[in-house]
Image: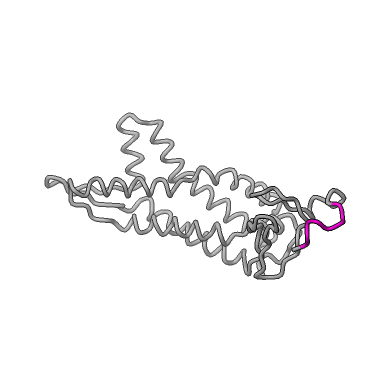
Amino acid sequence: MPDPSDTERLSDLPLNDLVACHECDLLMRKPRLAHGEKAECPRCGYELYAHRHNVVERSLALVIAALLLYVPANFLPIMQLNLLGQSSQDTVWSGVVGLFDTGMQGISVVVFLCSMGIPLLKLLCQLLVLLTIRLNIGRSYGLLLYRIYHHLRDWGMLEVYLMGVLVAIVKLADMAAITVGLGLVCFISLLLVQVWLEVAMSPHQIWQALSGEDDHAGD
């Protein structure tokens, strides 16, 4: 990485040649990386970005896997509850419907958006962004969709919903017989795939590919 104390004044460089550390705000010249290399801040050691292999192809595979898991994760039973001879199967969708039917419409809308609606929108935005790069069409729309995706990131709360499910299972374990359903396995798999996707889909390379600075993001 170039030394930030270089005698060349940073203010004379174009913005595209500069990068700022997200942790300590150090402004420095943007280094050019080879495949597999990563740039770190010389002051605090924070990883600025990395240049990964086959970003688009790997990310596309993960997005498709996440979309395939989305339906079973939300509509297959998460758990089966047996209490006093009565049995019920609960899914993410039935939880939303149950809240709505009991008069908590506002909470049901929030749960639907954070656990089903926004996660699906995020995946669709990622899919379309990657397709614009892979097919080299409509990259201006890809830029817009990628901005929308970044605004949606903080609203998709699958991990919070999962924690709520696990807490419910622990609290009900002494009161009823609980059987974990296939939906919970799919839900956890969906969460893990999305976390992996966040790592694999290098923002630096995606932004460069969408702006036309790097036409080899898939290499």
Answer left or right for 78 relative to 198: left
Tell me which residue sits at (71%, 67%) in the image.
Answer: 216
* x, y percent for residue 65: 48, 62
Tell me which residue sits at (35%, 46%) in the image.
Answer: 92
* x, y percent for residue 156: 49, 45
Q: Which residues are magenta?
A: 2-9
* x, y percent for residue 47: 63, 58
Q: Is residue 5 magenta?
A: yes
Query: In the displayed image of the protein, which residue is found farthest to the left?
Result: 85
Answer left or right for 142 relative to 126: right
Q: Quadrant of the C terminus?
A: bottom right
Relative to 173, residue 193 above or below: below
Answer left or right for 66 relative to 25: left
Q: How is the image coloured?
A: one colour
Q: Quadrant of residue 73?
A: bottom left
Front residue of this view, candidates 85 and 8: 8
Tell me which residue sits at (47%, 44%) in the image.
Answer: 117
* x, y percent for residue 15: 80, 50
Number of labelled discs?
Answer: 0
Q: Is residue 130 magenta?
A: no
Q: Quadrant of the N terminus?
A: bottom right
Q: Main secondary structure of the magenta part?
A: loop
Answer left or right for 105 relative to 79: right
Relative to 191, residue 161 above or below: above
Query: In the displayed image of the protein, which residue is found farthest to the top?
Result: 103
